[in-house]
Amino acid sequence: MEQKLRAINTEGLTIELGIGKLEDEYPNECFPVKFKPRNGKAKYSRYEEIDENLYEETAKMVCFYTSEKRLFYWIKACNILYYDNVSNIEGIDVKWSDNPQTWEDPNGGNSITIELLDQENLLYNVTIFISTGTIRVQGHYYQMFSRHHFPILKGLVSQITTRAEETREETRVKEVTSSTPIQYSPEPALNVSHLKVLQSTLIQSIDKLQISIENNTSSIIDAISKTCAEKIIKTTNTESLQQDNIVLKSQLQQEKEAFILKSRQLEESSKHLKQMLSDTRDELNRANSQVEYLSNKLSNQREELEALDTSNRELKCKLSEVQDELINMKSGILSESTARDNYKTVGASSNDNEQILPSVLLLGTSNVRNINEKVLTSAVSTTKYVTYTIEDATKFIGSCTSTYNAIILHILTNNIKNDEPNECVTKLQKLVAEIKTKWPATKLILSLTTPRNDGHQTASQLVNAMVKQQLLLEKEENVSFIEHHNMFDVSGGGPNLSLLSEDGYHLNERGVSKLAVNLRNAIHTTLKLGLPVNNQFNRSRSRQKNRFRGFPRGRGSYGRGSYNK
């Protein structure tokens, strides 16, 4: 059925252009002298042209408008196409209805609805609004109308317009000939005076038309005038002259109609584009205002975050100092208790020449190469291997057969340069799971990345945050991490450049020393050995006078690296 509708063309139509029943049903009194303004999206529609982008695709609708003079021609074209032709197709039903059934006011809300149905299913409907000249098409097959049936209707309107002009001209000529009969000379000579009158009348009509057409049509009028003059000189029969005159005026009228139609289309297109430009400017102004508001709001929030960040760093520093002091105090108590216990049991263990120390495995990047594991702390036996990446550390763990009380991993620095943050965390999680499976009782210490100034600072901070969040969420037993707060600039929160080498991510001698202190403190805290004590005897002698003052704290020998479990 759809193929039959698409196959309709002008050549196969039954076309009756003469005056018929339709003129009686819709006399001139039914139509307004001037249309009301269109509203909604219809005011952006084009003059006898369809813009399929005017409405959203889900609306399945298109529309256009025509002039007061041509509205009846469109109604007649729809009558020819749908009522006289499409309704004859088997399986297709056409319903024509007036809304309301009786039209009293031509400026009221009168309309004509034409429904095209296929077995009671609506293909599309055509609504002609009499008061505005808007013609709207809606339905699932609206594109069939805009791409196939609309060009046919437009051609029919052109034929109806031409036929109407010819009818009016024939009526006017009949009136002229009936009032002034033509006298023929007995000789075949040309009636020059009558021809001059016709020529004068024709030229005056052409001059009047020339006023309403732009300058670019003057050449067409001149050519037509010249042709008319030549035909008048050569014509010997008055009736043939009148017929030629009608044909020429019809051609001129068609040119005029085409020119006016094109002008209206260009004018409406210009109005449409201007309106779209105005709307776009308004939207841009609103968007700019919104962006400015959001920018100011973001700036204020950024300032608040910076203030909160500064306050947070200060609080962290104070908390770190308090924690260091508390750890040192506990370490002093533990060290004194251990010393007394060792003194009491020295006789019992006199036969043992060597003391069994806890074993620690340190795996790290080139930043741990310069750490002397032999003197890192005397409380444990430390074994160090340089593994540049997480992959290298994974291979080492897979081949390792020894058992350790604690394992320290400082292996994130190089992976951050080549992997995304989530990839780094995923690889580290797999390695942690492998270690926990192989040595369930071993304490695992994850050393977070140290400060850097090589363009990967943000990724480094993000990885640190993700590792901490993962550990806090999963609450892994025997797994802890080290934060190197004492290696950042306290004032700005950025990296302490005095601890970095020229490349921006390798540590210099001072940086390695800070890292070693943080690793040593983590070992003692994880294995509950107590922090190493300097000047023990001096502290013991002064303990009664100023208790615990001999313990280094704050920025002393052990630094302020924060250890979290």
Image: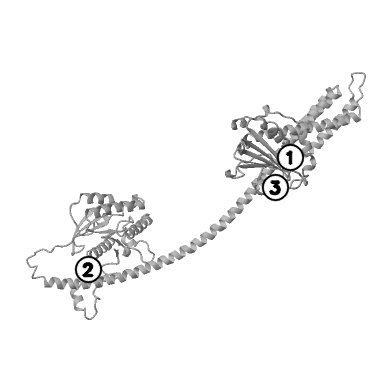
Asked if residue 139 shows in the view, the reply is yes
Who comes first in sequence, dot 3 or dot 2?
A: 3
Residue 219 visible, this angle: no
| Mark 1 vs 2: CB contact within 8 A | no
Query: Which residue in the rendered view is the most extreme toward the bottom?
Result: 545
In the structure shown, which secondary structural element does the residue marked by tag 3 occupy? Answer: loop
Q: Nearer the viewer, residue 140 or 269?
A: 140
Give x and y (percent) for residue 124. Answer: 63, 39
Element marked by disc 1: helix
Name the residue beneath numbered marker 3. Answer: 38
Report the front residue among 533 and 269: 269
Sequence-wise first label, 1 or 2: 1
Image side of residue 248 versus residue 347, left or right: right
Residue 264: x and y in percent read 71, 41
How far apart are labels 3 and 2 at the CA level?
88 Å
Residue annotated with mark 2: 530
The amino acid type of the residue labelled 1 equals Leu
Any mark on residue 87, and which? none
Q: Residue at x 82, y 32 (%)?
A: 169
Image location (x, y in percent) of residue 125: 65, 40
